[in-house]
Image: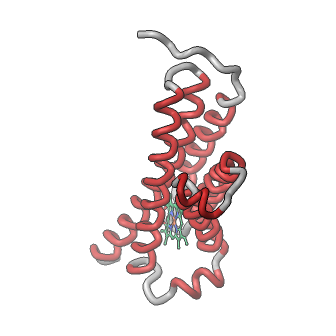
Amino acid sequence: MSLVIVQQIWACRLSGYAALLLLLGSQSLGAGRRLGWVSPKIHLRWRRRLGIYSALMASLHLFIAWRTFLSGWLVDALRETPWTQIGLVAWCILLLLWLTSYPRLVRLLRVHSWSGLHKLAYPATALALLHALLAPWSEPRIHLGLLILWTGLLGLRMLPWRPILKR
Ligand code: HEM
């Protein structure tokens, strides 16, 4: 395999991992808040920011995939391969969450259940993990590790609230 192709695959993979880790990072703040490690203010601010960065990174990832790995084949890939279709659905959800993270736009679009809508971050994470697992150069061990981490984070969210720890 030529060096350019290897570089293209890595650009694609690394941008995908960055988008996924930012998404997991935004959800880890909820667990941190439950444990009393993260203040409500930091939780609210950074959950939103990391969610936006994840959507931006996923868009860059899609652009890199289109210009490199899937160059001249993106539409056919989206029509024929489940792993790209799953990625597309995850990306559309992230875009929706991004657009509805601006209060003025939410008012303009008359979205009433903002917090209900933002629970879509969970199916988006599950789909992104599945997409990564089914991708042709996937590293199943990494994705299994990320799945365990994510399940742990969701489990921690079930804990009762704890007060913020004083330093
Ligand atoms: C239409 C949407 C998408 C397309 C066309 C797409 C395309 C690709 C391509 C071509 C690869 C490289 C294949 C490989 O590594 O085997 C890849 C890998 C990856 N993608 Fe996507 N992707 C999309 C959406 C997403 C989203 C929304 C996320 C995360 C939020 C994501 C996360 C990943 C990850 C983590 C990998 C690395 C998998 C691995 O090799 O271990 N992708 N994607």
Residue situated in front as seen by the camera: 3 or 148: 148
Residue 145 relative to residue 112: left or right: left
Q: Quadrant of residue 18?
A: bottom left
**Does the image show residue 132?**
no
Pick out the residue farthest to the left.
3
Quarter of the image that includes the C terminus: top left
- Dividing the picture into quadrants, the one containing residue 75 is bottom right
Q: Is 159 or 97 nearer to us in this picture? A: 97
Name the foreground residue: 20 vs 110. 110
The percent position of residue 140, horizontal first and vertical second, equals 57, 54
Q: Quadrant of residue 157?
A: top right
Residue 34: horizontal and vertical position, in percent? Answer: 61, 24
Q: Position of residue 51 (x, y in %)?
A: 51, 50
Residue 156 in view of the camera: yes
Which residue occupies 60% across, 47% down?
144
Residue 23 against residue 158 in the figure, above or below: below
> Which residue: 44% across, 79% down?
66
Give the position of the N terminus as an image quadrant: bottom left
Write the residue at 58% across / 14% down.
Answer: 163
